[in-house]
């Protein structure tokens, strides 16, 4: 059973990880290293990155709905995009 404590709360500013793994990842390339705001925790699921490798040892992680501005993702646009992202893709944003 996973730890049922959400690390992030609605309104938290987060940054997605920026590296490009050699294996499958559900974090879109256009969203790597970008700032977003947590909308809500959505529940737990096995990490798809590990499951896609045919392994049965995928950690179960909280999935978060995270809102990004189009300008943050693509450099233009006035709309927002919400992505469902695993906890391990996120870190608390350090904005100075």
Image (cartoon, rainbow, N blue to C red):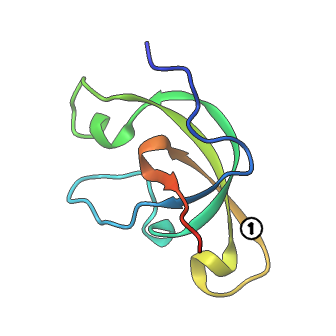
Q: x%, y% of residue 36?
A: 63, 62
Q: Residue furthest top?
A: 1
Q: Nearer the viewer, residue 83 or 52?
A: 83
Q: Nearer the viewer, residue 25 or 64?
A: 64
- Residue at point 53%, 27% (across, down): 44
Q: Residue furthest bottom?
A: 76
Left or right of 33, for residue 41: right
Give above or below for 23 relative to 61: below
Left or right of 86, for residue 49: left
- Residue at point 30%, 34% (across, down): 51
Left or right of 70, for residue 43: left
Give above or below for 19 relative to 41: below
Q: Quadrant of the N terminus?
A: top left
Q: Quadrant of the C terminus?
A: bottom right
Tag 1 secondary structure: strand
Q: Nearer the viewer, residue 6 or 1?
A: 6
- Residue at point 52%, 62% (across, down): 15
Q: Which residue is mark 1?
A: 80
């Amino acid at each position: 059973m996973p730890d049922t404590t959400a690390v992030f709360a609605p309104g938290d500013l987060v940054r997605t990880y920026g590296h490009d793994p050699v294996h499958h990842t559900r974090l879109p390339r256009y969203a790597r290293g970008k700032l977003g705001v947590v909308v809500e925790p959505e529940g737990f699921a096995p990490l798809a990155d590990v499951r896609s490798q045919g392994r049965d040892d995928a950690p179960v992680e909280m999935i978060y709905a995270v809102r990004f501005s189009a300008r943050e993702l693509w450099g233009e646009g006035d709309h927002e995009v919400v992505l469902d992202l695993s906890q391990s893709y996120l870190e608390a944003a350090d904005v100075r």
